[in-house]
Amino acid sequence: MSAIKKMKPIPKQITEVEKYMKDNVGLGTSFDLGIRKFKVLNKEIQLYYVNGLTDTLFILRAMQELVHLNDIHKDSPPEQFVELINNRINNNSVEKVSTLDEVVDQVLSGLIAILVEGYEEAFIVDTRSYPGRQPEEPDTEKVVRGSRDGFVENIISNSALIRRRIRDERLRFELLKVGERSKTDIAIVYLKDVANPDLVNIIKKEIKAIEIDGLTMADKAIEEFLVKQGYNPYPLVRYTERADVAATHILEGHVLIIADTSPSVIITPTTYFHHVQHAEEYRQSAAVGTFIRWTRFIGILASLFILPLWLLFVIEPSLLPDSIEYIGPNKKSHVPVIVQLFICDLGIEFLRLAAIHTPTPLSTAMGLIAAVLIGDIAVNVGLFIPEVILYVSVSAIGTFATPSYELSVANKIARLVILILIAIFKVPGLVVGVTLFIIYLASIRSLNTPYLWPFIPFHPIAFMQILVRRSTPGSKIRPSIVQPKNRLKQPT
């Protein structure tokens, strides 16, 4: 543990404050850190700010109000001076701090600090105006019908998007700062009368215990400290950029973590089945939503098991029933099938990465060239057999149908491991591989939450809600996995 830094109080001599800012913060060296000095009723006032993070128009209005005191309060007694300053700051968020460390932290966060000569406290005024984009629909969570506003990189805007959907006086946004140098704002969001207080306390304790220079990668760095994932490829928290999805989970009793500078919100705790649901299912009728969900389940299962099963049938043709004996390569290839599968599977990963780093107008053309020309030529020259292209493509489509990108990549890693076991041990490899896969998932716990709940341990009512999308009037009970204080969603 690092030593606790001693807080330096604000000196009465205002020139010492300026010297401290020059020596320790870079005033006069950093072009974006500014100071404005002026006199009010014969006392010097210093106003500190950071260009680009503050509302310049408000700073001008505040200065006008303070300078105007020279005309209307010339004969005011000195003991009323500080109170006059406080009353003339026309802002809804003003607080006082008594140490220079707090002044620096707030100024570098985008607030302004007003210091008065001879006064050992500073006025901190919230005039933040962070650069950023307007809320828009996330690219990875599009829906046919539904809201088009998504989270952005501004923690204030993100909290407003949630508050707009949940206007409950028991909704809490607890703000913490993490990072010795970055001092990143982190908000813990929950419903006070619903969320499990033990879960809230655990999350706060883990976040407060983070010791690091900075959280430049924001939410992902927080996740790695929070759940201590290590090299486990499976996601232990859920990310969303949709405000309606975040609000839904809050109402269910989940705790959310919002990191400034990140458009993704962390949802805790989550299970495997949280990652296979999508907002589109809840924007359609219950029957249509169930159909969409089952289609997605089939795609996920295909991404996991269609290639291992096909490889097993290629290695052991005797396992094939007579009705589907046509499955398997019709001609020999000089390249082993397992090598073909790995090359083709990794090739699709190359295409995905190339599409991410290719400008949008060119990515479609690049995909067509790769899929048509490269695939066709590879078959014609004998590098791949046609069925490899077919089944790898079906598996890839199932991967893209998985709502969670992190889960889709983890499933791909699991599939490659099962393929290797089948290539070495054949039928026992499949049995052992799938068994170890299920045992591994069942052993994972995220914030003391079983990862395969409600399948393992089995909870029939909750598992039925996973299989069938229930209508909103029929969903009266919050999921027990979050251990909510209030289990009923709707008053009885």
Image: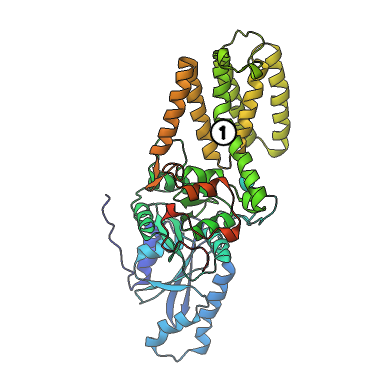
Q: Is residue 481 in sight in this rendering?
A: yes
Q: How many marks?
A: 1
- Rendered residue at 44%/54% (across/down): 480
387 or 295, nearer to the observer: 295
User: Measured along the vertical axis of the image, is residue 154 above or below residue 57?
Assistant: above
User: Measured along the vertical axis of the image, is residue 390 above or below residue 69?
Assistant: above
SS assignment at label 1: helix
Give the amino acid type for the residue marked by disc 1 in the picture.
Answer: Leu
**Which residue is tagged 1?**
301
45 or 344, nearer to the observer: 344
- Rendered residue at 51%/75% (across/down): 92
- Rendered residue at 43%/36% (across/down): 441
Classify residue 199 as left or right of residue 266.
left
Q: Is residue 52 in sight in this rendering?
A: no
Q: Counting other residues with Cα less than 10 Å from the Cα at mark 1, is it few (<14), some (14-19), or many (20 or more)?
A: some
Q: Quadrant of residue 244?
A: bottom right
Whole-percent x, y for residue 405 in the image: 55, 39
Whole-percent x, y for residue 50 in the image: 50, 61
- Rendered residue at 64%/44% (across/down): 292
353 or 423, nearer to the observer: 423
Q: Residue furthest front?
A: 322
Classify residue 162 as left or right of residue 115.
right
